[in-house]
Amino acid sequence: MTNVVRNLVTRKFLPTAWASSFFRSGTQSALPLICALFAALLASSPVLAQSTTQSSSPCATADHRAFNFWIGTWDVTPAGKESPTGINRISAQHNGCVIREEYSTRGGYTGMSMSFYDAARKIWHQTWMGLDGTALYIEGGLNERGEMVLSNANWPGYVAGSQINRVTWTPNKNGQNRGSVRQHWQASTDGGKSWKTVFDGLYIKRED
């Protein structure tokens, strides 16, 4: 820091006469105060602040933000229903490294999930748990259509021959429900040869 201050002083940041006398013998006691002043100025610099924020955001990549289209507060209408039966609050947590889901229905059912991009394995993971005690571990990523597709068949703990669960989130960008998201949960008991729908819901984002 001493050399930094000396360079700033001698490069005409301070008047020449003052700079020439600043480092004379007997005036060195003021150096700690000047160092602290320059450190404070550097710390408050917008450029430095932006650089620090960027360097401390490991989850700011496109892969980490691939599921951001799901963030928001949504009214959820199951297929075949005319009005919403539930609400889902999806938020980015921990500097954008985690997507948290809080789901509740008018009938009293609640559940939550935590989703994140596992950079080491280059795969998206979601852990879901509802009040019925049933856990769901699914993994995957975006397909060529921009849909997020997660399945427990991709999870390392999947037991061969057990039911396969596949959940697809489709962002709807056109049509009557512009900006909405469809969540389609399917299950297969024959290794993926046939599928049945477990849940099919349309998410409409709340204005607030």
Image (tube, helix red, strand yellow):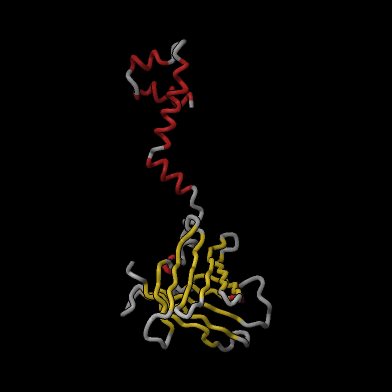
Quarter location, residue 152: bottom right
Q: Nearer the viewer, residue 146 or 115?
A: 115
**Is 89 situated left or right of 125 in this image?**
left
Residue 99 % position (x, y): 49, 64
Position of 28 relative to 177 (above/below): above
Q: Residue at x 51, y 58 (%)?
A: 97
How far across and how far down the image is residue 76, in percent? 42, 77
Residue occupying image coordinates x 41% and y 45%: 50
Q: Quadrant of the C terminus?
A: bottom left
Q: Nearer the viewer, residue 103 or 52?
A: 103
Can residue 144 be seen from the camera position used here?
no
Is residue 200 shown above or below 58? below
Coordinates of residue 1 in the picture (x, y in percent)? 48, 27
* Residue at horizontal 48 percent and vertical 59 percent from the top: 93
| Rendered view: 107 above or below 46 | below
Going by the image, does 205 lie left or right of 198?
Answer: left
> How many callouts does the rendering have?
0
In this view, 23 is above or below 182: above
Residue 119 location, x and y as percent? 56, 60
For the view shown, which residue lies furthest in the top direction?
25
Residue 128 appears in the rendering:
yes
Q: Is residue 186 left or right of residue 38?
A: right
